[in-house]
Image (tube, coloured by chain):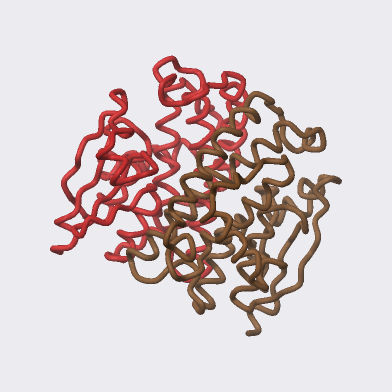
Chain colours: A brown, B red
Amino acid sequence: MDRLSAMKLYDVTRAPNPRRVRIFMAEKGISCPLVPVDLQALEHKSESFSALNPGQRVPALELDDGTAIGESIAICRYFEEVQPAPPLFGTGAVGRATVEMWQRRIEFELLMPVAAVFRHAHPAMAAMEVPQVPAWSEANRGKVQDFLVALDAQLAGRTFVCGDAFSVADITGLVAVDFMRLPKLPVPEALHDLRRWHAAVSARPSAAA
Amino acid sequence: MDRLSAMKLYDVTRAPNPRRVRIFMAEKGISCPLVPVDLQALEHKSESFSALNPGQRVPALELDDGTAIGESIAICRYFEEVQPAPPLFGTGAVGRATVEMWQRRIEFELLMPVAAVFRHAHPAMAAMEVPQVPAWSEANRGKVQDFLVALDAQLAGRTFVCGDAFSVADITGLVAVDFMRLPKLPVPEALHDLRRWHAAVSARPSAAA
């Protein structure tokens, strides 16, 4: 695919959002050059990167004609459109709506709260999260624990978040649970289905992307 | 369409998220019975509603077979799948990715910050937003103003957020800007393109939904 081989993904190795896209690409068998962006040096706020992505966020995908797509899930959606197999956004109307529902729930009720716990408390984030609100970091600890219980319940009797097929909802979930290590948030031992699922999705080759 | 006529939308008249779905349905020419949910009475946390939607959020769509779909954008996606015309999630791979990107930007950088300003400061929200963090309300005021400037820039030379075609990104934008009235956030006079666009999308019949 010439179209795909001529594109570039602006990337940060250790950040959760770029990892979502790299795992998605690995599951699709898509690869492209990765262009590292140095967040600590605030390179994402530079003039050249801002011209490409006025949102000043990573990841961003630059297509062969210079078109830039920002937002992890929008980038994943582009790949789903140009290479439908294997389907990672569900199949059929109900299936696609269900994957979208769970991708969003995990993003809003786990990934974003984990990010809030970390970004609003860690000194290394002070230049990136302005203003830091320590009370907001604290408030999100409980939200994370509440949602882990809900996710464990959803995973009871299901191989993956939305059933038998691995989807982008599993990718957001894996990245969110792994991101919990940074602010040292625990995954309770009692959540057996969550832990079984996490071990399974972590063992897929794509998890290393 | 029998399938569509047998469904029900659990709704809250004055809340922003259910309005997104009602506008989307109006643009598609889809209608179905609306079931009011009383948030002040915490009806969304009742046993019967929790059984339908464990996320305890409104809106939720119940299909004829009892399947429930939560999350506004997942419900909209379901309607897009079962009735593609007019397309409100974009057309073509780049078009769909672009609508997804802008829908998400407006949701994360405008609708959510406006909601945070309101929910973390207003006494009427104390039972629904636990814990309220007044400093988080304050921190989001600046985020709202910053994003309005970015959205105004995107709208320069464009009829709608993503170009010539009205999309779900415009719906999220309209609902977010109207929601700013509750916490009394201003739309600066100088943002001429934003104000021109807001007047145009507000004049569509769907805006009354």
In the image, residue B141 above or below residue A24:
above
The one of B119 and B199 positioned closer to us in this rendering: B119
Can you see residue B106?
A: no
On the rendered structure, is B44 left or right of B184? left
In the image, residue A95 above or below residue B105:
below
State the residue lying farthest toward the bottom.
A1
Q: Can you give x and y, in whole percent of width and height, for residue A61 in the image?
A: 66, 64
The image quarter containing residue A195 is: bottom right
On the rendered structure, is B175 left or right of B97? left
The one of B183 and B9 positioned closer to us in this rendering: B9
**Which residue is painted at 30% across and 59% down in the image?**
B79
State the residue lying farthest toward the front.
A190
Q: Can you give x and y, in whole percent of width and height, for residue B105 in the image?
A: 55, 47
Can you see residue B142?
A: yes
In the image, residue B178 above or below residue A89:
above
**Which residue is painted at 56% across and 30% down in the image?**
B190
State the residue lying farthest toward the right.
A41
Q: Can you give x and y, in whole percent of width and height, for residue B155 in the image?
A: 52, 47
On the rendered structure, is A109 left or right of A6? left
How many numbered dots are placed on residues in this image? 0
On the rendered structure, is A143 left or right of B68? right
**Which residue is painted at 62% across and 62% down in the image?**
A199
Q: Can you give x and y, in whole percent of width and height, for residue A45 in the image?
A: 77, 45
Q: Quadrant of the C terminus of chain A?
A: bottom right
